[in-house]
Amino acid sequence: MPGSIWAVLAGDGFLTVTTAIEATGSTDSKKLAEYLHSGKPFSGLTGEIAFNAKGDRVGEVYKVYRVDTEGRFVLQQ
């Protein structure tokens, strides 16, 4: 388990870009944005990732965790 949720979110950012590049076969920013705005979901480290036409992530984006006495992240409901 990573030491910080920020590492997981950074991983999702990396997966977002590489997924769009693989899907479009391009690194052209307009093509990547068009693909990401299409709403096609893909699996990320934090769950399913998809974006709406405005470019906002849809679904549950952030979760709140606390660190227990053993140093484990515990999801808060």
Image: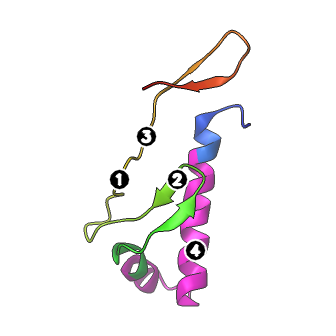
Circle 3 is placed at which residue position?
62
Quadrant of the image containing the N terminus: top right
Q: CA distance from mark 1 to mark 2?
A: 9 Å
Circle 1 is placed at which residue position?
59
Q: Which residues are magenta?
A: 9-34
Q: CA distance from mark 4 to mark 1?
A: 18 Å
**In this picture, residue 59 sits left or right of residue 3:** left
Q: Residue flagged by tag 3: what amino acid is it?
A: Tyr
Label annotation for residue 19: 4
Q: Residue flagged by tag 4: what amino acid is it?
A: Thr
**In this picture, residue 62 sits left or right of residue 19:** left
Residue in the picture at 56% in, 63% down: 43
Residue 31, position in %: x, y? 43, 86
- Answer with mark 2 or mark 3, whichever residue precedes in sequence: 2
- Answer with mark 2 or mark 4, whichever residue precedes in sequence: 4
* Secondary element at tag 4: helix
Other residues around mark 2 within 10 Å, as few (<14) / some (14–19) / many (≥20): few
* Secondary element at tag 2: strand
Q: CA distance from mark 2 to mark 3?
A: 10 Å
Q: Nearer the viewer, residue 55 or 42?
A: 42
Circle 2 is placed at which residue position?
47
- Which is in the foreground here, disc 1 or disc 3? 1
Magenta stretch: dominant secondary structure:
helix
Using the image, determine if residue 24 lies above or below residue 64.
below
Using the image, determine if residue 51 lies above or below residue 47.
below
